Image: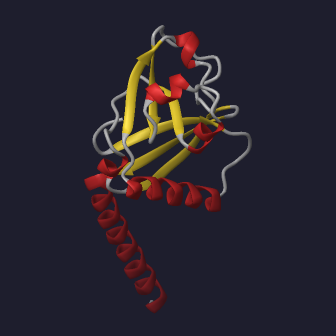
């Protein structure tokens, strides 16, 4: 992860369709536009694992205390009521990486790659902020080149 892109490992059984990837982009774009606060706090591992809807990688070893990241809800609220079913509507996970303080800081979002990295585990690479403009410019240049070449080939 850097200022222009991020990678996201997740568990998924089966292949991911183009429609599902488009839906992910729509959901993430909606969250970016909502400009939700992003909270991070170190919490004792045993207490953090009690949070409903917590996302963590199966088999991964986490430090104690563990860094809990929550989009939209303060970590203290999660810890005060860890079984609240409302938490299922948000994003809560263990993570040690650098994060935004607000979802709006991401500005833009586009999935640029999806790979199966192990059975049941996939990796999405995303483009964020300014690099998205560069990616779109590059894509349009490439498309123009391909269309020009195709037109030229059809004329011959």
Q: Nearer the viewer, residue 46 or 26?
A: 46
Q: Nearer the viewer, residue 106 or 125?
A: 106
Q: Nearer the viewer, residue 70 or 145?
A: 70
Where residue 29 sits, quadrant-wise, is bottom left
Where residue 144 sits, quadrant-wise, is bottom left
In the depicted structure, whether residue 150 falls above or below residue 65: below
The location of residue 53, given as percent across then percent down, is 63, 33
In the depicted structure, whether residue 88 falls above or below residue 141: above
Q: Quadrant of the N terminus?
A: top left
- Answer whether residue 61 is visible to the viewer in this image: no
Q: Residue at x 52, y 33 (%)?
A: 92
Q: Residue at x 63, y 29 (%)?
A: 52
The location of residue 91, given as percent across then percent down, is 52, 39
Q: Quadrant of the C terminus?
A: bottom left
The location of residue 116, given as percent across then percent down, is 62, 39
The location of residue 59, given as percent across then percent down, is 64, 17
Number of marks drawn: 0
């Amino acid at each position: 992860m850097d200022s222009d892109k991020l990678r996201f490992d997740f568990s998924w059984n089966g292949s991911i369709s183009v429609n599902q990837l488009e839906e992910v982009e729509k959901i993430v774009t909606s969250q970016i536009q909502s400009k939700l606060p992003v909270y991070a706090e170190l919490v004792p591992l045993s207490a953090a694992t009690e949070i409903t809807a917590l996302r963590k990688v199966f088999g991964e070893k986490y430090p104690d205390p563990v860094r809990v990241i929550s989009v939209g809800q303060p970590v203290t609220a999660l810890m005060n009521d860890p079984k609240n079913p409302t938490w299922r509507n948000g994003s809560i996970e263990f993570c040690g990486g650098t994060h935004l303080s607000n979802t709006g800081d991401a500005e833009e979002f586009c999935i640029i790659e999806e790979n199966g990295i192990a059975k049941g585990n996939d990796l999405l690479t995303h483009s964020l902020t300014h690099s998205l403009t560069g990616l779109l410019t590059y894509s349009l240049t490439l498309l123009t080149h391909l269309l020009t070449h195709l037109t030229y080939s059809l004329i011959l």
